[in-house]
Image (spheres, rainbow, N blue to C red):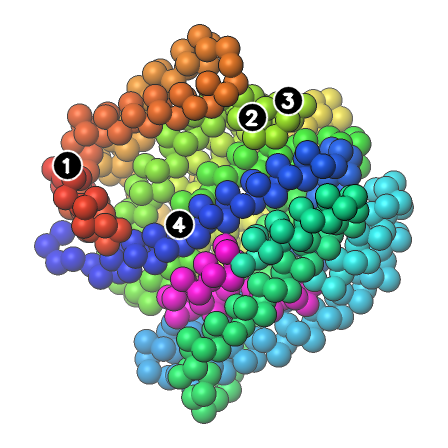
Amino acid sequence: MTDQDEGVTTLARQGSITFVGNVINGVLGFAIVMLMTRFVSPSVYGLFVLATSVILFMQVFANLGLPLAIDYFVPQHLDAGDRGKAKGVIVQVTATVLVTSSLVALVLALGAGALAEFFQEPPLRVGLLLLSVTIPMLAIYNVLLTSYYSIKKLQYRVIMRDLVRPIVRFAVTAGLLLAGFGLLGLVAGYIVGLFVAITVGAAVFTYKAWDLLTTEIELVATGPLVRYSVPLAMTSVVFVLMGHVDYFVLGFFLDSDDVGIYRVGYMLGSGLMIIFNSLSPVFKPLIAESRDDIELVEQRFRIMARWIAGITLPVAIFLSLGASSYLAVLYTPQYAEAAAVVALLAAAFLFNVTFGGPDGSLLQGLGYSRFVFANTLVLFGANLVVSFTLVPFLGMEGAAIGSATALFLVGGLTLVEIYSLDGIHPFTRDFAKVVGAGLPATVAGAPVVYVLESDYVIAAVLPIVVVGTYAGTLVLTDAFTDDDAQMAAAFSPTLRKWLPVGGSGQ
């Protein structure tokens, strides 16, 4: 590559901002779950997981997928200088989702008793009634998030999503649990954290995007918004249901404590999405604005795939090898029962996020929303069928196999589709070096688990051995490229200085 792609620098800079935010959010998220698992029983925590799963599923119907149109159309209008139309998209989406989400919240409140009876968990009714107020709140929350994505100012998202919300939620939840409120404390912490985050996020966005918000509004045609959003709305419905179908199936066949234990394992395994979630918000707008230049799109996709794989692979290795120890140390020994869940999901998420992610961000950016919808139907269908078949016999491991099967299947479909549609693929010699470095790292890490006996020692030593071996292998195989140097320079000049660049970037 002779000319540097400024999109790579933008991806790195904004991605580094979201990465820091995701790390903070992830640490606080783990802290909240650690707090919950120590102050309430797995059955109470399982009830809370069921309640929030229902809320997150219903809120997708509430927003009709329209927030996803913001970070697709607004960047295009801003790039064309049509600021009035950009404002029009944000205003029209906000007004619509406020109405629809309020109606869905009312329906949920009226049906809370029936859902509690279906899951045979009477206390679930109270949780659903209280949490129904968060449906319109979540709609506005998602509008704010995608508005930040659309203007590529993700530091504002970090403030709202990764700092304010988890910190407030942790403080309120801790106080109420110490006071003995149990399930009500978990629910109240969730509601208060979301409310404060929206308040702060709206104030920050209004201040920082004042020029855009004070521009004379120009309403846009609803047809393109609807045609783009409706397939993604259906995609979101299926995708969110897929993300929570495990809890529904486990809640139907097993007890609420199994739901709580599985949730902890799922959370640890899905933690691998932190790199993808850091780059994806800015990756989609970058693809959308350059979608007519397929060569540039492929170049950006290859860089993102290599970085996601390169950072996520060693984490997947030591999480899989030491799953039992990490569950016992981070939570309590009873949660080590979910070790197999962590290992299965770590492998599946690694494969899926490397090739576009479970939400199909590359396909979304290219405008192929119908393919994303079709893929998500496959994702949900495979997970539902496999989970319903295996959970009665294998318990929570059956649910994990269902999710893993679906993630592997859709990752493979995405690869086939982008190659068939535009001839794009991520497979290069340098990509192979990044993936191949995982073999010696796994070989070096395995003895740590079998030789050491203390869970605390394993949890501390295993990442050092795996990451150290992985990084050393990358250096020995000359795996770093000029594109990596550009990304590293955007992260930190010091990091760029120490990066041993020698690859071709092919």
Q: Residue at x 47, y 30 (%)?
A: 347
Within 10 angstroms of label 2, few (less than 14), some, or many (20 or more) residues?
some
Q: Give me the C-alpha separation between circle 4 and circle 3.
A: 30 Å
Q: Main secondary structure of the magenta part?
A: helix
N-terminal of the pair, mark 3 or mark 1, is 3
Q: Residue type at mark 3?
A: Pro
Q: Secondary structure at mark 3?
A: helix
Which residue bears the numbered disc 1?
500
Q: Are marks 4 and 3 in contact (CB under 8 Å)?
A: no
Please give the range of residues in magenta: 135-163
Residue 162 located within the stretch drawn in magenta: yes
Q: In front: mark 3 or mark 1?
A: 3
Q: Residue type at mark 2?
A: Val
Q: Secondary structure at mark 1?
A: loop
Q: Are marks 3 and 1 in contact (CB under 8 Å)?
A: no
Q: Residue at x 47, y 61 (%)?
A: 159
Q: Are marks 4 and 1 in contact (CB under 8 Å)?
A: no
Which residue bears the numbered disc 2?
329
Which residue bears the numbered disc 4?
19
